[in-house]
């Protein structure tokens, strides 16, 4: 298993601004995943972040809007840029620390954009 | 495109009243089917991974089963603390380790 923390836990932001979300894991992991959970909808993968390489984005998500950093094997950040109310969502990171098809999720960051 | 459909959207049971949640899926080669539990304001908590039709896994009052088209999460004699949203997800054989989620079943157990 893995213990995952995210900062901030929640935030309220003005449209047009940016927010950076941090994800910290208690063990070294190869891949970290960033998901979005919009109200009433399913979790959707935004991108996969490998240490030392650029993140891989899913269809519908672009680097300019959701830049990701992965400076080491235990940490990643997701930035939500130029926010609009449609970006109001819960953002979650996840890892599969033992590569045995058990993805563990962080507690999430609840973002509200006014 | 991989798809996951969960039913019902919401389910209210009396304490001790057993039932099943359904997860229907289409995927281009199944690597694994996952069940998670999510409590309000928290991230999903991993429950099970199933890999092939006929496989079953159990944890306390929960049992997950898998066929080629769907999975069931059976809840036996539930307690109020089993109240949560249960999420189903699939992972395809090809590509990255992406999970495709359903929208979940919101389960309420009434004391």
Image (spheres, coloured by chain):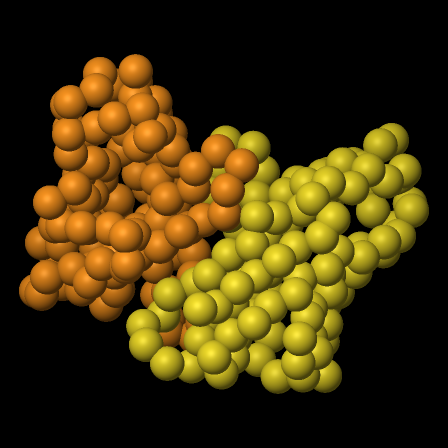
Asked if residue A20 can be seen in this view, the reply is no
**Residue B1 picture location, percent across and down:** 44, 69
Image position of B68 (left or right of A100): right
Seen in the picture, residue A7 relative to A68 is either above or below; the reply is above
Q: How many marks can you see? A: 0
Q: Which chain is displayed in yellow in the rendered image?
A: B
**Towards the viewer: A58 or B64:** A58
The answer to whether residue A41 shows anywhere in this view is yes
Q: Where is residue A55? Give x, y as percent.
A: 16, 60
Front residue of this view, candidates A35 and B78? A35
Considering the image in quadrants, where does the C terminus of chain A appear? top left
Q: Residue at x 16, y 42 (%)?
A: A65
Task: Point out residue B29 in the picture as x, y percentages from the top left corner.
Answer: 49, 83
Q: Vertical placement of B26 versus A22: above or below?
A: below
Q: Residue at x 50, y 47 (%)?
A: A42
Question: Residue at 38% of width from left, 33% of height from top?
Answer: A89
Q: Report the side of A79 relative to B74 (left or right).
A: left
Quadrant position of residue B61 = bottom right
**Left or right: residue B98 compared with residue B39:** left
Front residue of B109 and A28: B109
* Residue A84 in which image quadrant: top left
Rendered shade, chain A: orange
Which quarter of the image is occupied by the N terminus of chain A? bottom left
């Amino acid at each position: 298993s893995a213990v995952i923390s995210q900062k901030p836990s929640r935030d309220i932001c003005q449209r047009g601004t940016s927010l950076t979300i941090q994800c910290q894991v208690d063990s070294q992991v190869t891949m970290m995943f960033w998901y979005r959970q919009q109200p009433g909808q399913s979790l959707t993968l935004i991108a996969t972040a490998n240490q030392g390489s650029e993140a891989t984005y899913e269809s519908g998500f672009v680097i300019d809007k959701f830049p990701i950093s992965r400076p080491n094997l235990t940490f990643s950040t997701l930035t939500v840029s130029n926010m609009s109310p449609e970006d109001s969502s819960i953002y979650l990171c996840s890892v599969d620390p033992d590569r045995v098809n058990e993805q563990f999720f962080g507690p999430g960051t609840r973002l509200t954009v006014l | 495109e991989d798809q996951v459909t969960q039913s019902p959207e919401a389910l209210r049971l009396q304490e001790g009243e057993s039932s099943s949640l359904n997860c229907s899926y289409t995927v281009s080669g199944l690597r694994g089917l996952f069940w998670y539990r999510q409590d309000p304001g928290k991230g999903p908590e991993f429950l099970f991974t199933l890999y092939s039709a006929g496989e079953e896994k159990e944890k306390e009052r929960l049992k997950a089963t898998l066929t080629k088209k769907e999975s069931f999460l059976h809840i036996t004699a539930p307690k109020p603390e089993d109240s949560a949203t249960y999420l189903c997800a699939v992972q395809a054989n090809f590509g990255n380790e992406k999970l495709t989620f359903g929208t979940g079943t919101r389960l309420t157990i009434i004391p």
